[in-house]
Image (cartoon, rainbow, N blue to C red):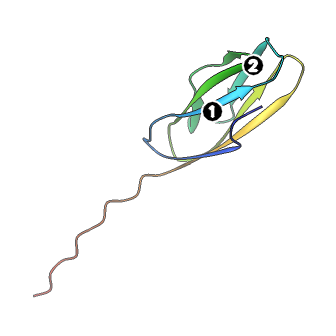
Amino acid sequence: MLSASVVTFVVGAPAAQVVVSEQNYSGAFIVSSSNASVAMTDATRATGPSSVLRIVARSAGVAFIRVSDEHGAIATLRVVVVPQPSPAHPQQKQQ
């Protein structure tokens, strides 16, 4: 049902696109995040048989994006968001 099972981001990275699809299904997909402060989608509803969801990383942590259909089928996307790497500190010259 989902084009990926895990997505990993760095905080501040561009949104990722994930396809949700179900053959011969024209109903609604309901989309939710277990932790919207970490990751969220651009929509809470999508329409079958296929839709593209944009996943946006908001802060470091783990969230699960849950997609369900009107028949009770559920797919889950694990989203891992890591902090931006610290800038390298230039070595100081020894005198």
Residue in front for this viewpoint, 1 or 33: 1
Q: Which of marks 2 and 1 is nearer the N terminus?
A: 1
Residue at the image position 58 percent from the left and 36 percent from the top: 39
Neighbour tally class for label 1: few under 14, some 14-19, many 20 plus, Cα within 10 Å: some
Tell me where residue 54 appears, x and y as whole percent.
Answer: 56, 28
Q: Residue furthest right?
A: 71
Q: Is residue 1 shown above or below 71? A: below
Residue at the image position 22 percent from the left and 76 percent from the top: 91
Q: Which amino acid, mark 1?
A: Val
Q: Of helix, strand and loop, which one carries label 1?
A: strand
- Can you say which quadrant of the picture contains the N terminus? top right
Q: Nearer the viewer, mark 2 or mark 1?
A: 1
User: What residue did someone put label 2 on?
Assistant: 29
Side (left or right) of 15 relative to 51: left
Residue 48: mark in rendering: none
Q: Which amino acid, mark 2?
A: Phe
Q: Of helix, strand and loop, which one carries label 2?
A: strand
Instruction: For marks 2 and 1, give the CA distance.
Output: 13 Å
- Can you say which quadrant of the picture contains the C terminus? bottom left
Q: Is residue 8 shown above or below 25? A: below
Residue at the image position 66 percent from the left and 29 percent from the top: 19
Side (left or right) of 49 relative to 44: right
Residue at the image position 75 percent from the left and 18 percent from the top: 49
Which image quadrant for residue 16?
A: top right
Side (left or right) of 28 relative to 17: right
Tell me where residue 12 appears, x and y as whole percent.
Answer: 42, 41
Q: Is residue 82 shown above or below 48? A: below
Residue 18: mark in rendering: 1
Which image quadrant for residue 29?
A: top right
Q: Residue furthest bottom?
A: 95
Residue in front for this viewpoint, 51 or 73: 51
Residue in front for this viewpoint, 51 or 57: 51
